[in-house]
Amino acid sequence: MFRTRLNPTKPPAAHRAVLEHVGAGCREFRAAAEAGRIQPHNVDQAREILSRHRVFSVGVPVEFGGAGNQPLLVALAAERLGREGPTALFALLAHLPAAVTVAHRGTLEQKEQYLRAAAAGTGLSGATLREMESTAAESTAYDNASRHADESILPTDAVLTYRLARAAGSIGRLADCIEVLAEFTAARIQQEDVVEGNFPIDRFFAEAATDLEAARAITYAAAELKAEFDARPTSEHLKLEASTLVNEAYFFADKALDRMLARAAETPLDRDSRILDHLPPRHELTWPVEAILDEGPPSMENEIARYYLVL
């Protein structure tokens, strides 16, 4: 793990066993990807490997065969998967909104049927979400919704869970890139291929590391606030506060990753290469699709701005 004050290597005891399974799935996934046994962007192959380690139990309530859907657990799992690149992370991101929707809108029979299957790694389809929409009574705490790409409606909690996981996943990608690039650059300095005290290189790592710490601070604060909202789902004040902080975490973490990649493309490592040229191949991939949630207007910037403009 990249050393940081805001991401302890020992997570809360309640989540440790689950995260060990997530880590084992990530290690198997990376070995398969590096051996060429997984095609880039093949989410089905990623899901097959990760499901063997019960990764998709994250986001599913314990009473239905899952590991739990606590925001901190979701964020920690997403950050770990993010270190493996967008394909592994995407598999979790595709799972979470559907699992949360079933948990909040499904009947007891539907929860038993679908959530146990989801925890085992069986993806939930758009048809499942439409069934939730047509048969389940909606809780007033979750009647605010966003539109999914397959035209079904997601409860607020599902949208916030996705955005929180997306933020944490971007942090994982950023942390892994910094760690690998720092190790490579330090080795080049020791070999005297790169001059120590090179200002552009120092500035690159200083800016990237500061963005990483800031993104973690916002994201894990958002996870704590979302947990408070989950405990008091009828509080309109908590819903607004949690939604805004999750949105800010999502926006900042994605932008922090983008900034790091842009700086890496501009910063020379030596006369023949840029820092970007030594990026881990797993992070050279773009997202398998542009977005899982087709959230439409208002944009993320609009949602954040409206909170401060009191519109």
Image: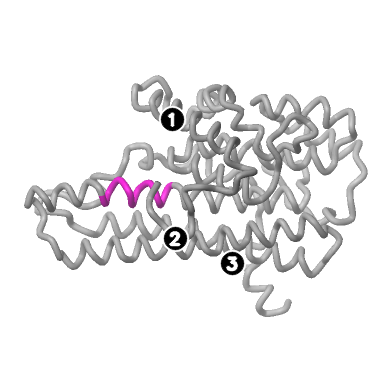
Residue 76 placement, left or right of 309: left
Residue shown at 38%/46% (left/top)? 176
Residue 84 placement, left or right of 74: left
Q: Can you identify the residue that label 2 sits on?
A: 5
Q: Can you identify the residue that label 3 sits on?
A: 301
* Coordinates of residue 305 in the picture (x, y in percent): 63, 73
- Range of residues picked out in magenta: 173-182
Q: Is residue 276 above or below residue 266?
A: above
**Mark 2 is on which residue type?**
Arg
**Which numbered circle lies on residue 27?**
1
* Coordinates of residue 66 in the picture (x, y in percent): 71, 33
Residue shown at 48%/54% (left/top)? 7
Tell me which colouring the rendered structure shows.
one colour
Residue shown at 35%/61% (left/top)? 208
Tag 3 or tag 1, which sits nearer the N-term? 1
Q: Viewer-nearest of labels 1 and 3?
A: 1
Image quarter for residue 52? top right
Secondary structure at badge 1 equals helix
